[in-house]
Amino acid sequence: MASEDDQPNPDELLKAIQREEQQNTLGRLKIFFGMSAGVGKTYCMLGEAQQRQKDGTNVVVGLINTHGRKETEALLQGLPLIPEKWVKYKDIAFEEMDLEAIISKKPELVLVDELAHTNVPGSKHPKRWQDVVEILDAGIDVYTTLNVQHLESRKDVVENLLGIPIRETVPDLVLERATSIELIDIPPSELLKRLKEGKVYLGDQSILAAENFFKEHNLTALREIALRFTAEKVDHDLHGILLGKGWRTRERLMVAISSSPSSEQLIRATRRLSFELDAPWVVVHIDTGAT
């Protein structure tokens, strides 16, 4: 006879149905994910977009940065481009993605490179990931790219390993909205070869990258973090499927914080653990009134 724990949980089943109904009205997000620039995220995204267009999908390019890579530029051929708009800041005009034009056009799929990008002040949203969320909420599918160091919950790990500050991050909640995360992976030695051949950056930018960020030990560490996150995401998604069948989560996490600067790291660590366990979590701060 099945135990009580083996029986379907009505509350979990209802939540699963509600999630599915909501997802049917929202755009679907696919993230091409990798350890760093140059692994081929944009190239793979464009290649898949070309195939989707051949299959009859209405695809548009919202924003793509080719960094002068000829192979990547070639894959833009035939894909309709939404012109970028000019945003003026301190008497200088900058080009940014035209969010309003994309939503107005109502394509089935839009390509948006570099999810972690910070928009120019004066844009509708401070961050590009916020633009992407608005596009998804409008019922439009999005393909985008992301490097592992820009994932908010991995920020402290990357900074400790590499000794460099990470200034642009994307909240984990955005990645949780993704229906697909595709890991684009190559060995660090192959990436360094691409860098030397000018297939990652051009000119002085390539030299500067080789002297700083693009060291084999750095790339190896980033690759390990990316592989580990992708494996955790697969486990998390599988657990979500099992929950939909009535399995229950028993773990609950709580993190207590103070005004200490280390509280931010505690929150990120708890967020990572909650993702791995697929467990709800809360942050508690007790105000004693002391100054």
Image: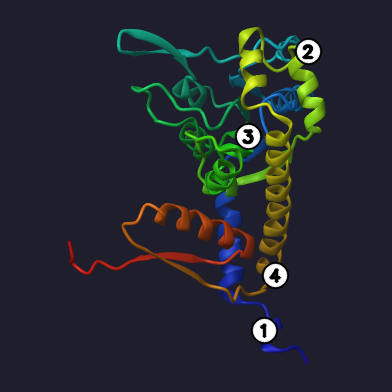
Question: Disc 4 or 1, which lies upstream in sequence?
Answer: 1
Assess disc 3: are there few (<14), some (14-19) or many (≥20) residues with their C-alpha within 10 Å of its C-alpha: many
Which residue was labeled with disc 1?
5
In contact (CB < 8 Å): disc 2 and disc 4: no
The spot of residue 147 in percent (x, y) is 63, 34
Which residue was labeled with disc 3?
147
Q: Is residue 154 visible?
A: yes
What is the secondary structure assignment of the residue under circle 2? Answer: loop
Picture quadrant where residue 143 is located: top right
Question: Disc 2 or 4, which lies upstream in sequence?
Answer: 2
Mark whose residue sits in front, 4 or 3: 3
Which residue was labeled with disc 4?
245
* Cα–Cα gap, marks 2 and 4: 51 Å
* Cα–Cα gap, marks 4 and 3: 33 Å
What is the secondary structure assignment of the residue under circle 4? Answer: loop
Mark whose residue sits in front, 2 or 3: 2
| Front residue of this view, candidates 141 and 265 | 265
| Front residue of this view, candidates 252 and 98 | 252
Mark whose residue sits in front, 1 or 2: 2
Say which quadrant the C terminus sits in.
bottom left
* Cα–Cα gap, marks 4 and 1: 12 Å
Which residue was labeled with disc 2?
197
Amino acid type at circle 1 is Asp
Does residue 82 appear left or right of residue 57 in this picture? left
